[in-house]
């Protein structure tokens, strides 16, 4: 039976879609059959980040409504074996997500995939609730920034009270913190909360720290999950986080500032 | 600071740059989205009607219907592959392929 993982945050723009694409590609690159689902109904974007936007025929909502079979809506990644994308509808709204409809899709995917990643929309309404409801594990994507940390706490509360596991009294959803857009230089200057500050407040196990990196924009420009940019800090940090998720013991990198030469400091370029 | 202008190019992004690819990908996908905005979601209907016609002659398994779409600059190509069941076990199976293109 496959594991359902929700990538969630409460707040928008913190890196859920970037992280969903990176984890999905990371699992698949390690030979684990993975599907990544876009739950942001009406604002389809995962297809662009995954670079399959030209091949979307049917979507998640078509499957829920019985207008297409699941096999027809799954888009197979052209570069990576074992990787599939289930895009969302660009024209309908989040009311199209019914609990029964989502459950039927999840049950079918569970039989065939090892990992099912649910890319949650922002907010705490229907779309976000449906994305987390069936989760076995939750990756809480957080930025070292006040509103993001508070919203993450709110989402942790929803996982504990309103997920399927909570409602049925099963073992709770496993929680992981993914701290993204971390800038060690600003942390050093005291302009940004430290990793320890965030861990103190949220008190959940740390899965990884993803540095602020220009590679993320470059990757989304061309529709390639950033984990495939193996020379970038963000790509390496995602690869480490995927390894940790799979049980490997990998040390945290990119949490300390790198020493920069005079020239790069003058240019003000992030490393 | 003029010396540092050497490092910043004033020219539009080069064709192979990632920013250029971003713009091109967006133009393709958004042209199609704008064209179909508020219109009916015709693909499910098209598929259902095609299947209804074929089902008059043979039993088709919905899971054996493959629909592929590819969008390039001005043209979308839709390809529908339908695997027909063999009449008797062991005999050859058939496949119907329908292909259509629209340009905008
Ligand atoms: N580690 C990072 N470094 C730099 N930019 C990032 C990073 N992670 C995400 N971003 C940028 O932040 C924006 C929001 O990311 P996205 O993954 O779409 O967030 P969400 O899905 O949570 O709304 C995007 O422009 C993305 O390129
Ligand atoms: Mg998103």
Image (cartoon, coloured by chain):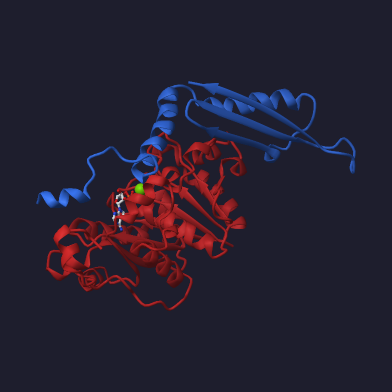
Chain colours: A red, B blue
Residue A36 or residue B21, whichever sits in front = B21
Q: Residue at x 59, y 43 (%)?
A: A70
Q: Is residue B33 among the parts visible in the rendering?
A: yes
Q: Residue at x 43, y 23 (%)?
A: B35
Within the image, what quadrant is residue B88 found in? top right
Q: Quadrant of the N terminus of chain A?
A: bottom right
Within the image, what quadrant is residue B46 found in? top right
Q: Quadrant of the C terminus of chain A?
A: bottom left
Residue B53 placed where, x, y %? 72, 22
Q: Is residue A193 among the parts visible in the rendering?
A: no
Q: Is residue A222 above or below residue A184?
A: above
Give the residue at the far left of this rendering: B1
Q: Is residue A164 above or below residue A220?
A: below
On screen, residue A141 versus residue A26, left or right, reads left
Residue A125 placed where, x, y %? 33, 46
On screen, residue A190 versus residue A226, left or right, reads left
Q: How many marks?
A: 0
Residue A140 placed where, x, y %? 34, 61
Residue A100 or residue A229, whichever sits in front = A229
Residue A156 or residue A251, whichever sits in front = A251
Within the image, what quadrant is residue B45 found in? top right
Q: Residue at x 52, y 43 (%)?
A: A101
Residue A121 or residue A271, whichever sits in front = A271
Q: Residue at x 54, y 36 (%)?
A: A58
């Amino acid at each position: 039976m496959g594991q359902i993982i929700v990538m969630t945050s409460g707040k928008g723009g913190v890196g859920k879609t970037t992280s969903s694409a990176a984890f999905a590609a990371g699992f698949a690159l390690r030979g684990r059959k993975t599907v990544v689902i876009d739950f942001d109904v009406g604002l389809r974007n995962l297809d662009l980040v995954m670079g399959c936007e030209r091949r979307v025929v049917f979507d998640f909502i078509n499957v829920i409504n019985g207008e297409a079979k699941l096999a027809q809506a799954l888009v197979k990644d052209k570069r990576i074996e074992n990787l599939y994308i289930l895009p969302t509808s660009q024209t309908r709204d989040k009311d199209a997500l019914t609990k029964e409809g989502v459950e039927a899709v999840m049950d079918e995917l569970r039989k065939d995939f090892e990992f099912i990643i649910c890319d949650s929309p922002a907010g705490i309404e229907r779309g976000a609730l449906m994305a987390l409801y069936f989760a076995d594990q939750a990756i809480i994507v957080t930025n070292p920034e006040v509103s993001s940390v508070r919203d993450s706490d709110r989402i942790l509360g929803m996982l504990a009270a309103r997920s399927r596991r909570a409602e049925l009294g099963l073992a709770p959803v496993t929680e992981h913190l993914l701290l993204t857009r971390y800038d060690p230089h600003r942390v050093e200057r005291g302009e940004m909360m430290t990793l320890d500050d965030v861990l103190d407040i949220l008190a959940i196990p740390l899965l990884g720290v993803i540095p602020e990196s220009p590679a993320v924009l470059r990757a989304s420009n061309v529709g390639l999950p950033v984990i495939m940019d193996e020379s970038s800090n963000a790509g390496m940090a995602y690869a480490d986080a995927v390894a940790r998720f799979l049980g490997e013991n990998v040390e945290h990198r990119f949490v300390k500032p790198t020493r920069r030469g005079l020239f790069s400091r003058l240019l003000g370029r992030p490393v | 600071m003029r010396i540092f202008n050497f490092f910043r190019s004033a020219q539009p992004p080069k064709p192979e740059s990632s920013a250029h690819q971003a713009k091109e990908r967006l133009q393709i996908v958004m042209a199609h989205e704008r064209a179909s905005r508020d219109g009916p979601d015709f693909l499910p209907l098209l598929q259902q009607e095609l299947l209804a016609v074929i089902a008059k002659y043979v039993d088709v398994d919905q899971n054996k219907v493959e629909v592929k779409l590819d969008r390039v600059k001005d043209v979308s190509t839709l390809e529908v592959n339908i695997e027909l069941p063999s009449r008797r076990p062991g005999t050859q199976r058939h496949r119907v392929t329908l292909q259509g293109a629209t340009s905008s």
